[in-house]
Image (cartoon, rainbow, N blue to C red):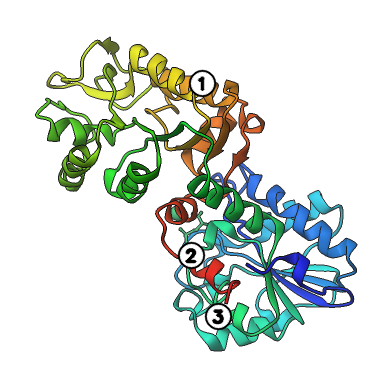
């Protein structure tokens, strides 16, 4: 993959695709600016190496056409604060001025962006002499701002994209063993690809979150009122058959009567969930066993919470995994999304080897799928 080491940027106008798809609250305030911070090394390096102008492209949410609620205005303002200078926001590529750092509005406001339209890519390319892609979180998409445009200018990966790809490929290629994968979250169908990949390369796979219920159902357990993805049962059953003893499921649960912090709840020293109850966290025996596997690992990959960690009575399982990931001497890599949010909530985000800024992108890379945004930088 071509990187910044292969690109001459001195005196050049540089178009930089970043993933600034950050969470916003109702007042359009950024609640977590990790992804903006993560692009700073690339932006700083480009400026130190004499880039004449930086023009940034980014998406926010999934608008269909122009949607003021998904304007990048709060993002441009936050970037300006972090860089210590004004970042102008242009409504379209043709309106970009000659400020040192500018952003174009949400690329998903423009027709053709998500169809990888080459005509739109031309409008982006006209802004610069060279192109840098640092948007790892969007690398599994083939869109005009990360794929088509990379074909039109001398192009290379920024430092974030480079580090993400090197770290995640390293887990597959030569992990320190044992390699332990901790996979949680709500849906088996979201994670079955990565479970299959880890059945090949990992030593142990620890499953948690609501996605354990399709596994339990496949084993003939009662799931009660638990969130249990029906389409997940068949793939779960198949993964269990293929697992060769690598796949570990919870041995106990914390159950509640509803999805709220003040619902009646109790520990259940089994996995058959009674009628009217739902499993909302792994139990204390499971949490301790999973923590021990993590502490004994050489490499840990973690994606997805063990339970409804945003509700205090059901946070202990995810907390135990997060603490063990922070404590262990293993190389630790955490996939984006909810596991990253959990680490941040527990104040442990700086205690991992690599916290990926990509959710879907990191999973697809580990599944062995080609990422269009990466492939185009290798061709
Ligand atoms: C993400 O937040 O997962 C990335 O920015 C990609 O966004 P998308 O799933 O809307 O393409
Ligand atoms: Mg996503």
Mark found first going from the N terminus, 1 or 2: 1
Q: Nearer the viewer, mark 1 or mark 3?
A: 1
Q: CA distance from mark 1 to mark 3?
A: 44 Å
Question: Is residue 315 something that shows in the picture?
Answer: no
> Quadrant of the rendered structure where residue 330 is?
top right
Q: Which residue is mark 1?
A: 295
Mark found first going from the N terminus, 1 or 3: 3
Q: Residues within 10 Å of mark 2 (few under 14, many from 20)?
A: some
Q: Where residue 85 appears, x then y in whole percent?
A: 86, 57
Q: CA distance from mark 1 to mark 2?
A: 32 Å
Q: Which residue is mark 2?
A: 371
Q: Which residue is mark 3?
A: 148
Q: CA distance from mark 2 to mark 3?
A: 13 Å
Q: Where residue 28 appears, x then y in whole percent?
A: 60, 49
Judged from the image, the secondary structure of the residue bearing numbered disc 1 is helix
Q: Residue at x 51, y 49 (%)?
A: 173
Is 207 left, or right, of 22 in this rendering?
A: left
């Amino acid at each position: 993959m071509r990187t910044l080491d292969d690109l001459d940027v001195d005196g050049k106008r540089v178009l930089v695709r970043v993933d600034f798809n950050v969470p916003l609250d109702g007042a359009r305030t950024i609640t977590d600016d990790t992804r903006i911070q993560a692009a700073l090394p690339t932006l700083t390096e480009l400026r130190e190496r004499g880039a004449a102008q930086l023009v940034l492209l980014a998406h926010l949410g999934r608008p269909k056409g122009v949607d003021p609620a998904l304007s990048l205005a709060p993002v441009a303002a936050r970037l300006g604060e972090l860089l210590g200078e004004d970042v102008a926001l242009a409504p379209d590529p043709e309106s970009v001025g000659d400020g040192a750092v500018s952003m174009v509005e949400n690329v998903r406001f423009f027709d053709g962006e998500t169809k990888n339209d080459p005509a739109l890519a031309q409008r982006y390319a006209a802004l610069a002499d060279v192109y840098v892609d640092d948007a790892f979180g969007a690398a599994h998409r083939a869109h005009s701002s990360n794929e088509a445009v990379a074909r039109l200018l001398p192009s290379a990966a920024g430092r974030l994209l480079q580090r993400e790809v090197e770290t995640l490929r390293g887990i597959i290629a030569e992990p320190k063993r044992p390699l332990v994968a901790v996979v949680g979250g709500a849906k088996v169908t979201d994670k079955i690809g990565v479970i299959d990949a880890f059945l090949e390369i990992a030593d142990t796979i620890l499953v948690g979150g609501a996605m354990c219920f399709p596994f339990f159902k496949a084993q003939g357990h009662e799931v009660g009122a638990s969130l249990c993805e029906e389409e997940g049962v068949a793939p779960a059953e198949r993964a269990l058959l293929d697992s060769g003893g690598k796949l570990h499921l919870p041995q106990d649960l914390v159950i509640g009567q509803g999805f709220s912090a003040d619902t009646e709840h109790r520990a259940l020293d089994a996995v058959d969930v009674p009628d009217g109850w739902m499993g909302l966290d792994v139990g204390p025996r499971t949490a301790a066993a999973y923590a021990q596997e993590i502490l004994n690992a050489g490499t840990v990959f973690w994606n997805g919470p063990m339970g409804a960690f945003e509700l205090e009575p059901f946070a202990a399982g995810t907390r135990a995994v997060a603490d063990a990931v922070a404590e262990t001497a293993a190389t630790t890599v955490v996939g984006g999304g909810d596991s990253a949010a959990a680490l941040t909530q527990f104040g442990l985000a700086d205690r991992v080897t690599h916290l990926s800024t990509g959710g879907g992108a990191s999973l697809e890379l580990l599944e062995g799928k080609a990422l269009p945004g990466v492939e185009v930088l290798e061709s």
